[in-house]
Image (spheres, helix red, strand yellow):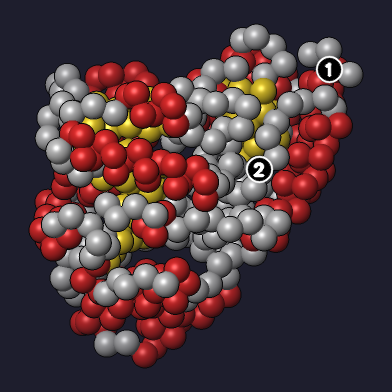
Amino acid sequence: MISDKMKPMMENSSVIRAMFEEGMKMAAVYGKENVYDFSLGNPNVPAPDCVKQAILDILEEEDSTFLHGYMPNAGYEDVRKAVADSLNRRFAMDYGPENIIMTVGAASGLNDILKTILNPEDEVLTFAPFFVEYASYVKNYDGELIVVSPDTETFQPNLEEFEKRICEKTKAVIVNTPNNPTGVVYSEETIRRMAEILERKSGETGHPIVLISDEPYRELVYDGVEVPFIPKFYKDTVVVYSYSKSLSLPGERIGYLAIPKSMTDWETVTAAATIAHRILGSVNAPSLMQRVIMRCVDATSDIGAYEKNRNLLYGSLKEYGFQCIRPEGAFYLFVKSPLEDEGEFCQVCKKHHILVVPGSSFFCPGYVRISYCVSHEQIQRSLPAFRAVAEECGLI
Ligand SMILES: Cc1ncc(COP(=O)(O)O)c(C=O)c1O
C-alpha cells in the first residue's frame, strides 16, 4: 500500500523515538527517578510567564473571528512586522513584513524553502553531524543531501571538503548553529570563509547557491557567546527560525522564514515560498501562537537553567575521563564513545539506566549525543551511573 518513497524513510525512522519508548518501558520497570533519559531535545524549562499571560489576554481582548479565522498564508501582517522589527533591532537588518513567512516550526520552514527552490536531483550540502531529518526533507523534493565529513577536532564545518563538494548541481547548503548535536557555535571567521566560498562558487556555477540557516537554538548560548547573524555575511541566506526551543513551545509549532531583500529574486522566492507553505498543507502558521509571538517577540525561557545543567554535566563527564567539546550553545553534549562501537557504548549506558543517542543517527559514528534539557535533579541523580559507565569502560 505505501509508496516506494516512504519505505526507506520508515526503515530509517527515528532511533530517537524508539529510545523514547524504551525509556518509558524502563521507567515502568525501575521507577521514573531511576531512569536517566537524555535522548530527547524536548525543553524541560517551562515557557516564560509572558506566554501564558499573552494567551489569556489574547482570548479576552482579540476578536474571535479574527483570531480563529483564515488569514494570508504568510501569516498576520502585524506579527510579521513585529518579527521583522525585532530582527532589525537586534541585527541591524532591513526586513519588512513582506520578508517574513510565519511557519509551523523549523521543520515546516525547512520543507517550505526546500520545496520552493529544489528541482529533482539538485544537491543540498550539509555538515556532519547534523539533524538527521534534513535527509528526509531534501528527499521530499527529490533532491540529494550531500554530507561533508566532520572535523572532529573542533566540530566547525570542514570548509576544505565543502569547497570541493560544490558543483553545478549544488542548489543549497544547510547550516545549523548553535548546532544539534554538538552544541558548537560557528565562529564569525568560519561564516566569513563559508560566504567567500559560496560567492566564488555561485559565480563559477552561474547560479546562486542558497544558504539555509536553520537556527532554532539561536538564543540558547552561554558565557556571553555571540552567534553571527549569517545574512549579514552572505546575501542569499534564508533564516529558518523556530520558537520550539527559545520559548519552550515545541508542541505549538511556530516559527518563521526570513527571506532578505538582498536575496536574488527575493520577491519571487517569497511569493513561491508563501504558496509552497499553503500547498504543503500547512496553509498558515497556528493563529493563536502567532498572536503570542507578537506579544513575546523578544522573550526567551530561562536559558540560565540549561547553562547550569551544562556546567554540571560537562564538568562531571570530563572528571570521569570522557572526551567532549565544551558546548557553547543549544542543550547537547556530543561525547566521544570510549568503546570503538558507539552502539555497544549505548548498551553499557542503558545497563546503567542512561539513555543516549548514537552519533550514527547524526552521520557521525563514534560519538553519542546527550541532551541536557532535563531537570537539574535528573543530572545530579545520574552522576553515579555515569561514573559506573566510565569505570566499566576503563576510563577510571
Ligand atoms: C537543528 C534542528 N532543526 C530543526 C528542528 C525542528 O524544530 P521544530 O520543532 O521547530 O520543527 C530541530 C528540532 O529538534 C533541530 O534540532
Crowd around label 2: few <14 · some 14–19 · many ≥20 (10 Å): many
Asked if the residue at label 1 sits under 8 Å from ligand 1, the reply is no
Q: Is residue 240 above or below residue 340?
A: below
Q: Identify the amino acid type marked 1.
A: Leu
Q: Position of residue 25 (x, y in %)?
A: 59, 29
Frontmost residue, 180 versus 128: 128
Frontmost residue, 187 versus 66: 187
Cα–Cα gap, marks 1 and 2: 21 Å
Frontmost residue, 11 versus 267: 267
Asked if the residue at label 2 sits under 8 Å from ligand 1, the reply is no
Q: Position of residue 280 (x, y in %)?
A: 17, 48
Asked if residue 175 can be seen in this view, the reply is yes
Which numbered mark, 1 or 2, is in the foreground of this view?
2
Where does label 2 land, which residue?
A: 327
Q: Identify the amino acid type marked 2.
A: Pro
- Toward which corner of the image does residue 270 lie, by quadrant? bottom left
Asked if marks 1 and 2 touch (Cβ < 8 Å), the reply is no
Q: Position of residue 148 (x, y in %)?
A: 41, 25
Looking at the image, tell me whether mark 1 or mark 2 is earlier in sequence order. Answer: 2
Residue in the image at 25% along x and 61% along y: 262
Q: Position of residue 63 (x, y in %)?
A: 27, 87
Image quadrant occupied by the C terminus: top right
Residue in the image at 44% along x and 52% along y: 215
Residue in the image at 17% along x and 65% along y: 73
* Mark 2 element type: loop
Left or right: where 59 falls relative to 388: left
Q: Is residue 51 above or below residue 133?
A: below
Where does label 1 land, which residue?
A: 395
- Toward which corner of the image does residue 57 lie, by quadrant? bottom left
Residue in the image at 42% along x and 72% along y: 92
Left or right: where 238 falls relative to 247: left
